[in-house]
Image: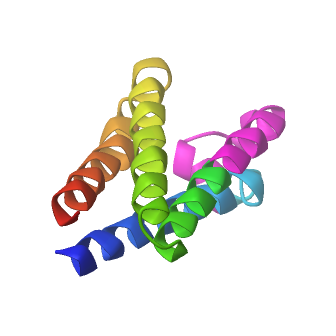
Amino acid sequence: MEILANVLVALVAALHGYILVMEMFLWQKKPGFGFHGFDPEMARRTAAMAANQGLYNGFLAAGLVWGLVAGDPTGFRVQVFFLSCVIVAGVYGAATANRRILVAQALPGALTLAAVLVAQ
């Protein structure tokens, strides 16, 4: 079960790394604005905000990677903390921006947190 939990943590970290790239580097290019359904002008106007959001997603990814490489009990605690942050951010994003965020971010975080807790 620990291997499964670690794989899931790595996948959630990769998801947030992907979000970082989309929001910080590809926001004004077709993959970025097409992903969010924006036209190029809206993408241009919101680029600074998106880059800021991308940076936060990068911090989530970095924290999850830290949790994977740190020895226990630190690694376990770091994973629980950052997965909790992922869930809270996903729920808040779903409530304030787009309901898809609940499925795309909060649900994977919650399932992964459950796996981490069970594996401990």
Magenta segment includes 16: no
Q: Residue at x 36, y 30 (%)?
A: 99
Q: Nearer the viewer, residue 40 or 56?
A: 56
In the rendered image, the residue lying farthest to the top is 96
* Residue 60 higher or lower than 84, as above or below: below
Q: Position of residue 107 (x, y in %)?
A: 28, 45
Query: For the magenta stretch, what is the residue range?
Result: 31-56
Q: Quadrant of residue 36?
A: top right
Magenta segment includes 49: yes
Question: Image quadrant for the C terminus?
Answer: bottom left
Asked if residue 117 lies left or right of residue 86, the reply is: left
Q: Position of residue 14 (x, y in %)?
A: 50, 68
Asked if residue 38 lies left or right of residue 97, the reply is: right
Asked if residue 73 lies left or right of residue 26, the reply is: left
- The total number of labels drawn is 0
Question: Image quadrant for the N terminus?
Answer: bottom left
The structure's colour scheme is: rainbow
What secondary structure prevails in the magenta region?
A: helix
Q: Residue at x 40, y 41 (%)?
A: 84
In the rendered image, the residue lying farthest to the bottom is 3
Q: Nearer the viewer, residue 13 or 74?
A: 74
Q: Position of residue 79 (x, y in %)?
A: 43, 56
Q: Residue at x 53, y 76 (%)?
A: 69
* Residue 111 higher or lower than 5, as above or below: above
Q: Position of residue 97 (x, y in %)?
A: 50, 25
Q: Quadrant of residue 16?
A: bottom right
